[in-house]
């Protein structure tokens, strides 16, 4: 009878402790979801920045080449 009572008390303590643990799991799961979404957004933004940088570098290259052609042999920049 004593062992049965001890077992019931242990089960009750376990059930009592389970509530806060489940709440903590819920909070951590939500935090993980938010962090995953944030990282995904940052990765998309970084990809957009890389694409924009590549476009700007290509544009700069064209402008530099056009400047070299316009400057000619004497090194003086002329406007077309």
Image (cartoon, helix red, strand yellow):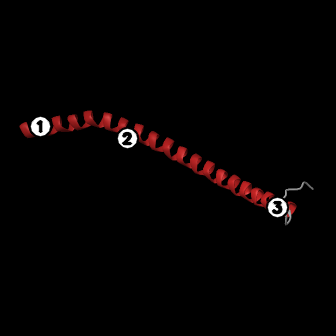
Residue 29's image quarter? top left
Give the mark nearer the N terminus: 1 vs 3. 1
Q: How many residues crowd mark 2 within 10 Å: few (<14), some (14–19), many (20+)?
A: few
Q: Label 2 near label 1: C-beta < 8 Å?
A: no
| 60 relative to 34, above or below | below
Q: In the rendered view, does 24 fall on the left or right side of 40?
A: left
Q: Nearer the viewer, mark 2 or mark 3?
A: 3
Helix, strand or loop status at disc 2: helix
Instruction: Tell me the quarter of the image containing the C terminus.
Output: bottom right
Local packing at callout 3 (Cα closer than 10 Å; few below 14, some 14-19, many 20+) is: few
Dot 2 or dot 3, earlier in sequence: 2
Residue drawn 70% across the image and 52% down it: 52
Picture coordinates of residue 76, whole percent (x, y): 85, 58
- Alpha carbons under labels 1 and 3: distance apart: 96 Å
* 27 relative position to 54: left or right: left
Mark 1 secondary-structure assignment: helix
Residue labelled with disc 3: 75
Cα separation, mark 1 vs mark 2, equals: 28 Å
Other residues around mark 1 within 10 Å, as few (<14) / some (14–19) / many (≥20) = few
Q: Residue tagged by mark 2?
A: 25
Residue with the mark numbered 1: 6
Q: Nearer the viewer, residue 23 or 2?
A: 23
Q: Is residue 5 above or below residue 75?
A: above
Q: What residue occupies the far front of the structure in this picture?
A: 74
Which residue is pictured at 75% across the width and 56% down the height? 60
Q: Specify the farthest residue to the right.
A: 80
């Amino acid at each position: 009878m004593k062992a049965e009572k001890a077992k019931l008390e242990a089960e009750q303590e376990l059930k009592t402790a389970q509530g806060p643990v489940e709440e903590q799991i819920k909070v951590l799961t939500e935090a993980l979801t938010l962090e995953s979404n944030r990282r995904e957004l940052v990765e998309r933004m970084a990809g957009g920045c890389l694409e924009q940088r590549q476009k700007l570098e290509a544009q700069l290259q064209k402008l530099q080449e056009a400047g070299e052609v316009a400057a000619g042999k004497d090194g003086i920049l002329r406007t077309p």
